[in-house]
Amino acid sequence: MQKHYDIIVAGGGCAGFTAAVQAGRLGKRVLLVEKNGMPGGILTVGGNNEIAQFWAHQKQLIAGIGWEFCKRLEAIGGAEIPDMTQVYPKHWMYGIHVNIPLAAYMMDEMLLEAGVNLCYEQTLCAVQTEADGDRNRIAGVTITSKSGLIDLTADTYIDCTGDGDLSVFAGAQYECGTPDEEGLSLQPGSVRYFLNGSKVSDEENKRIHAVLNAAIADGSLKAPDTKRASYNQLIYCKGNNINHISRFNGADSEEKTAANIEGRRCAARIFQALRRAGITPDMEMICPETAARETRRILCDGYITAEDYVAARVYPDGICHSYYPIDLHRDGMGGIQQIFLNNGETPSIPLSAMTVKGISNLYAAGRCASGDRLANSAYRVKASCMAMGQVCGAAASLAVDENSGRTRGIDFGKLRQILEENGAILPPIENTN
Ligand SMILES: Cc1cc2nc3c(=O)[nH]c(=O)nc-3n(C[C@H](O)[C@H](O)[C@H](O)COP(=O)(O)OP(=O)(O)OC[C@H]3O[C@@H](n4cnc5c(N)ncnc54)[C@H](O)[C@@H]3O)c2cc1C
């Protein structure tokens, strides 16, 4: 295995995938380190296979590598892209539903086509830093491998681990949830399981619903296990986005383990309750991870506030769009705090919100980018993560070419030009002259 790369991308979810593909297409020697056996993160291993939101108000707002991925997946029968020229009453109706194994396959193919070196089932577990003026720079990283620990170096690094592991190991500051009397309040996660059954008649659906409610009443099922969804909804969604597994921090190994166990218990409770109702669908699979909606937010030079997000603030360094309402899930049966965007307004993400504070050669893209909890609950959606990843792949390539790997001081106009040439849609920028 090569020991030095131009760019190391940690984490191969939606953000890491596009970051690595973009940098690879720009001719960089890229290594993608992913702790799971497939790319996709929450999209695949986490089982949440809805991608929001490339279009809004009949206009495409995010394109580039993420959109190409969806179109290529659709062409092989692995994605259902709604007619985006229609106006839908609910934002989630613009979501693209993808087939999980085919999505991972397509990501593999696009990464390999771009010449990216892939390291699956290997975890980035340590970072070495050294002084670089008034900041630190990452001098090298350590990853696990089948032959033991391996030390690697790169000019520039991109943290796409969702949890911000690379940044935190490098000493970056971060925020995570809100402390409360019970510890740390974070959005709950959800587990996806694949119950294979057929929808039933309305009458039968009502009968099963009564049995599920009785199970909640006698404590054998918890209310957040189904959030009182009907049997037909459970079968249709295969558990997707239905349950809430609360009070865990996915960036803490012990708590993440407990959440994965609780996720399987939740699926087993539902299965048993259905058996008691005389229904025996197959439990074909429970996803390996209880997917976390929220963990660490890495502090960067810029910080997206909910106020700025909802007001669609125009930044001097705006570099991609994000489109989704504020969408903060509350624990248990607490519902969702939503703030909708004004019709016709589109929030942007500034490059500074991905330029990690205090580290000279590190970007953070996707779920762990810098902003407050409410803003993060919106820009964490997959199309936005894909847009941010592509930005960081292009920015890191420029940093390597022009700036000895340093992320600050790259030619911003050139970055916008490269992104446009690579199919991305750019937001307007504030004129600072
Ligand atoms: C239950 C749920 C429902 C959701 N619903 C929707 C929806 O309907 N539509 C939508 O668009 N979005 C939805 N989201 C949000 C969205 O799925 C995620 O925020 C987004 O996928 C995050 O992408 P990412 O690439 O930033 O992070 P992730 O998908 O978390 O990817 C991070 C990757 O990094 C890897 N990794 C982590 N640590 C390390 C390490 N130390 N070394 C190596 N690799 C590492 C992980 O294995 C993972 O593959 C939902 C999220 C959840 C949890």
Image (spheres, rainbow, N blue to C red):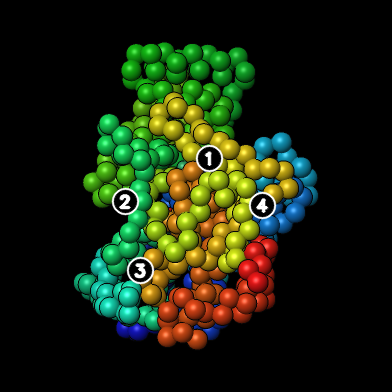
Residue denoted by label 1:
327
Measuring 55% from the left and 68% from the top, which residue is drawn there?
Answer: 391
Query: Identity of the amino acid at label 3?
Result: Gly
Mark 3 or 4: in front is 3
**How dense is the environment of label 1, judged by Cα within 10 Å: few (below 14), some, or many (20 and up)?**
many
Ranked by sequence position, the earlier of labels 2 and 1 is 2
Measuring 62% from the left and 39% from the top, which residue is drawn there?
Answer: 340
Q: Residue 369: image x %, image y %? A: 45, 58
Between the residue at mark 4 and the residue at mark 2, the CA separation in whole angstroms equals 30 Å
Between the residue at mark 1 and the residue at mark 3, the CA separation in whole angstroms equals 30 Å
Between the residue at mark 1 and the residue at mark 4, the CA separation in whole angstroms equals 16 Å
Residue denoted by label 3:
358
**How dense is the environment of label 4, judged by Cα within 10 Å: few (below 14), some, or many (20 and up)?**
many
Mark 4 or 2: in front is 4
Q: Looking at the picture, tell me which residue is in the foreground, 82 or 288.
A: 82
Between the residue at mark 3 and the residue at mark 2, the CA separation in whole angstroms equals 21 Å
Q: Looking at the picture, tell me which residue is in the foreground, 185 or 125.
A: 185
Q: Are marks 4 and 2 in contact (CB under 8 Å)?
A: no
Indicate left or right for 334 with 78 as reference: left
Ranked by sequence position, the earlier of labels 1 and 3 is 1
Residue denoted by label 4:
346
Q: Residue furthest left?
A: 148
Q: Are marks 1 and 4 in contact (CB under 8 Å)?
A: no
**How dense is the environment of label 2, judged by Cα within 10 Å: few (below 14), some, or many (20 and up)?**
some
Residue denoted by label 2:
251
Ranked by sequence position, the earlier of labels 3 and 4 is 4
Q: Secondary structure at mark 1?
A: strand
Ranked by sequence position, the earlier of labels 1 and 4 is 1
Q: Residue 106: image x %, image y %? A: 55, 64
Measuring 71% from the left and 36% from the top, which residue is drawn there?
Answer: 89
Q: Is residue 406 visible?
A: yes
